Amino acid sequence: MTMNGLSAPEVRVDEPAAMSAAACMFRSLGDPTRLAILRHLAAGEHKVVDLTAHLGLAQSTVSAHLACLRDCGLVSSRPQGRASMWSLAHSAELMELLASAERLLAATGDAVALCPTYGEAAAR
């Protein structure tokens, strides 16, 4: 109820669509290589060649993961000569999300890693 006695109009949220979008975002972050790329980009812009050297991965692998992250709106690139410089698209929000995830992981201990459905053993 507002101060004038009238209630604010109810905002309807399409909950299934919102949950689907959130699940898609978490799937985009659900790969260790993509998380490693984001960690490197948090330190500043990188070229694909820099990321391949840091991560020890093939250029095609890094490029495919960058394309996924770009398509999800998490990274962007700008041309620099014949190369592209990659950076985080929403640095503050992404770092806040990852920091929250680290706090949650610390609070739950080994539960996620030991989960029979999504844990480390289930991925094998």
Image (spheres, rainbow, N blue to C red):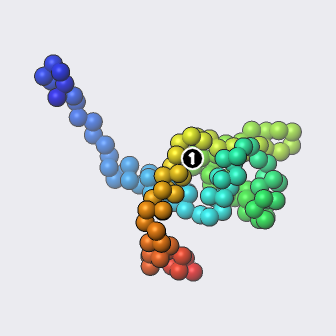
| Residue pictured at 74% horizontal, 43% vertical | 45
Within 10 Å of the Cα at label 1, are there few (<14), some (14-19), or many (20+) other Cα atoms? some
Residue 120 visible? The answer is yes
| Residue pictured at 86% horizontal, 43% vertical | 82
Question: Residue 8 vs residue 106: left or right?
Answer: left
What is the quadrant of residue 92 in the picture?
A: top right
| Residue pictured at 81% horizontal, 53% vertical | 50
Depth check, front residue: 58 or 99: 99
What is the quadrant of residue 20 in the picture?
A: bottom left
Relative to residue 61, is residue 100 depicted above or below?
above
Depth check, front residue: 98 or 64: 98
| Residue pictured at 62% horizontal, 54% vertical | 68
Q: Indicate the position of residue 29 as horizontal and vertical percent values.
A: 56, 57
Which part of the image, by quadrant, shows the N terminus? top left
At mark 1, the secondary structure is helix
Q: Indicate the position of residue 55 as horizontal and vertical percent values.
A: 75, 62
Q: Amino acid at mark 1?
A: Met
Question: Residue 52 vs residue 112: left or right?
Answer: right
What is the quadrant of residue 3 in the picture?
A: top left
Which part of the image, by quadrant, shows the C terminus? bottom right
Q: Which residue is mark 1?
A: 95
